[in-house]
Amino acid sequence: MLFAERLLAVLSGERPVHWMLGQTVGEAYDQLIRLAPATPLRARGARPVVRRCGGFPLRPGVVEAFASIAAGEQVRAMAFRLEQGTDRKWRCAAVELGSERH
């Protein structure tokens, strides 16, 4: 849930992308740089929140996770991959957003 909330903060415009430095690896930071300027998870009126979050381990040290993001009547899907480094810290390795539903 922590990473979903961090990603939501960046993708809703509450936090700058560089806030995720050190919490991302590989392509994930570049994906955030491309996605964040459009603030795809910002909503008019209601503040977006993580409604549901879950994940599935792919192998030791790798989790595919998902979250549903709600803001009023709008619901968006977010998928992300977490990878555990040799320092035992988890970092986001990929981010994808689903289309908007009303």
Image: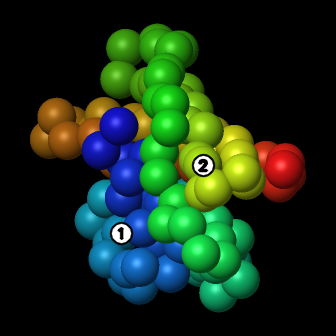
Circle 2 residues within 10 Å: few <14, some 14–19, many ≥20: many
Residue pointed to by mark 1:
20
Q: Which mark is residue 53?
A: none
Which element type, helix, strand or loop, lies under badge 1?
helix
Where residue 11 sits: x, y (%)? 55, 70
> Nearest the camera: 52 or 30?
52
Please report the residue visible at 46 percent of the width from the left and 59 percent of the height from the top: 7
Q: Is residue 60 left or right of residue 86?
A: right
Where residue 70 sits: x, y (%)? 60, 49
Where residue 5 sits: x, y (%)? 38, 52
Which element type, helix, strand or loop, lies under badge 2?
strand
Residue 27 seen in this snapshot: no
Where is 6 relative to 19, above or below? above
Q: Which mark is residue 70?
A: 2
Q: Is residue 20 left or right of residue 29?
A: left
Please report the residue visible at 20 percent of the width from the left and 41 percent of the height from the top: 89
The answer to whether the residues at label 1 and label 2 have Cβ atoms under 8 Å apart is: no
Where is 46 relative to 1, above or below? below
> Nearest the camera: 10 or 91?
10
Q: Quadrant of residue 77?
A: top right
Where is 39 relative to 5, above or below? below
User: What's under tag 1, amino acid-wise?
Assistant: Met
User: What's under tag 2, amino acid-wise?
Assistant: Ala
Where residue 57 sits: x, y (%)? 47, 14
Please report the residue visible at 84 percent of the width from the left and 48 percent of the height from the top: 101
> Nearest the camera: 43 or 6?
43
